[in-house]
Image: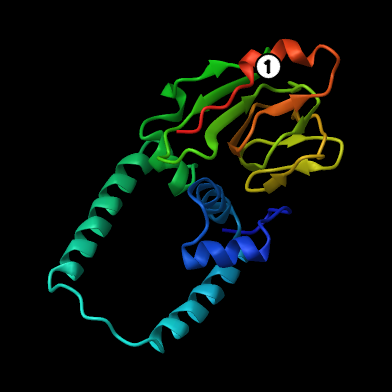
């Protein structure tokens, strides 16, 4: 795939992803970014090769005779499930397809505001809420700050804020103090994958009215 992304996870995140030590929510987002980004795929391959070399220098450990068969069974099962998901979500990254399970159009969307819908996922962890956010064409979210970390990957369409335009595959990390107001492109809806460790904090005087709708639900 031709690389057209301009915003990427940093090298430390790729190192942790390669080593398998990155937390679940962040790993889902990095994996989604890799679906679009050839340059990060190349970096990850280099990191994997380094890790493989280090592992080859380690002392071997005896394991049960059926471990290989168990691993292959899990791999085969993953391939079968991926094929079923890809049949309905050809444009979505593998990690997102595994979460959706069925057609994206049938996902249980809920209204957050007049411009934004959300579809939450169960990911088996309790630190981040992982969800899809859909911004309608030309729609604006409230201007807001962040109480914690927020990972975002653009899956479809584009949006912009005061700093840049973000297109399919772009990976963003927002932290406390990063105030912005995302706005969907005029030519179509934008769908993003996000992982939040804390609710966003609207900066408008009437922002407190939105708090009941902005609670997160890690699961």
Residue 140 appears in which quarter of the rendering? top right
Residue 4 place in picture, x, y as percent: 68, 54
Residue 84 place in picture, x, y as percent: 30, 41
Identify whether 70 is placed above or below 118: below
The answer to whether residue 126 is seen in the rendering is: yes
Identify whether 209 is placed above or below 148: above
The residue at the point 52 percent across, 72 percent down is 45
Residue 194 place in picture, x, y as percent: 59, 37
Q: Is residue 206 left or right of residue 128?
A: right
The residue at the point 53 percent across, 40 percent down is 127
Locate the C terminus by quadrant.
top left
Neighbourhood count class around disc 1 (C-alpha, 10 Å): few under 14, some 14–19, many 20 upward? few
Residue under label 1: 211
The residue at the point 79 percent across, 41 percent down is 165
Residue 171 place in picture, x, y as percent: 66, 49
The residue at the point 48 percent across, 38 percent down is 126
Q: Is residue 140 left or right of residue 219?
A: right
The answer to whether residue 186 is seen in the rendering is: no
């Amino acid at each position: 795939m031709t690389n057209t992304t301009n915003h990427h996870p940093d090298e430390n995140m790729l190192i942790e992803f390669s080593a398998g030590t990155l937390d679940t929510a962040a790993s889902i987002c990095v994996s989604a970014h890799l679906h679009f980004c050839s340059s990060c795929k190349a970096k990850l391959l280099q990191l994997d090769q380094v890790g493989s070399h280090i592992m080859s220098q380690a002392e071997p450990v005896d394991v049960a005779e059926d471990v290989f068969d168990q691993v292959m069974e899990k791999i085969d099962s993953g391939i079968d499930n991926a094929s079923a998901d890809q049949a309905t979500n050809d444009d979505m990254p593998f990690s997102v397809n595994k979460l959706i399970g069925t057609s994206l159009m049938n996902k249980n969307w809920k209204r957050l505001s007049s411009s934004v819908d959300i579809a939450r996922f169960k990911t088996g962890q309790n630190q981040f809420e992982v969800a899809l956010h859909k911004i309608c064409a030309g729609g604006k979210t409230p201007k807001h700050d962040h109480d914690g970390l927020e990972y975002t990957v653009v899956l479809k369409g584009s949006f912009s804020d005061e700093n840049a335009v973000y297109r399919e595959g772009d990976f963003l990390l927002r932290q406390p103090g990063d105030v912005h107001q995302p706005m969907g492109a005029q030519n179509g809806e934008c769908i993003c994958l996000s992982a939040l460790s804390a609710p966003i904090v609207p900066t408008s005087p009437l922002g407190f009215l939105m708090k009941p709708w902005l609670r997160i639900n890690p699961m």
